Amino acid sequence: MMSKNTICLWYDGAALEAATFYAKTFPDSAVGAVYRAPGDYPAGKQGDVLTVEFTVMGIPCLGLNGGSGVAHTHAFSFQVATDDQAETDRLWNAIIDNGGQPNACGWCQDKWGLSWQITPRALSAAITDADTAAAKRAFEAMMTMTKIDIAAIEAARRG
């Protein structure tokens, strides 16, 4: 049964491929029902995969093979809180090594154009530190990074 509120993500024919990648990469993720088009439509033919139900870290999603012309933007992203550098590296590298692109401050894009923020909990704690000077140092260190380096963030926080 479909959730009352589901994130719908538009793909150009790759919804099942993307859902399968997310399911094998992120914990608490899975591919659910795959629905095929009952007739021809602008982006495909009868019998093509039209929609895919899946979850990403417990969040219900629907992949829609809507065709070309609708690109993902940074206005929507999944923010993934990681517990340590090993988890940060694993998730970041999985996205990048699967055709993705790095971006600034812990952001990257998967090969389908969807944005991900791979954000260590240590970074969130550092930039919200009650010691505003420590928070500023950590923030300034983050601004120079692509993938977040927790040791460098913690060193900057300490001064």
Image (cartoon, rainbow, N blue to C red):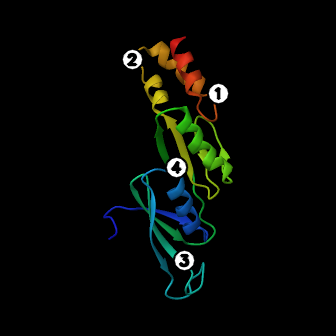
Tell me the residue at 49%/87% (across/down): 38
Residue type highlighted by circle 1: Thr
**Residue located beneath label 3 in the image:** 49
Q: Residues within 10 Å of mark 1 (few under 14, many from 20)?
A: few
Q: Nearer the viewer, mark 4 or mark 2?
A: 2
Among the 4 quarters of the image, the one containing residue 121 = top left
Q: Residues within 10 Å of mark 4 (few under 14, many from 20)?
A: few
Residue type highlighted by circle 2: Ala
Element carrying mark 1: loop
**Residue located beneath label 1 in the image:** 144
**Residue located beneath label 4 in the image:** 75
Among the 4 quarters of the image, the one containing residue 151 = top right
Residue type highlighted by circle 4: Ala
**Residue located beneath label 2 in the image:** 130
Task: Give residue 120's position: percent from left, percent from top.
Answer: 50, 33
Q: Is residue 118 above or below residue 127?
A: below
Residue type highlighted by circle 3: Val
Q: Which comes before the other along the chain, label 1 or label 2? A: 2
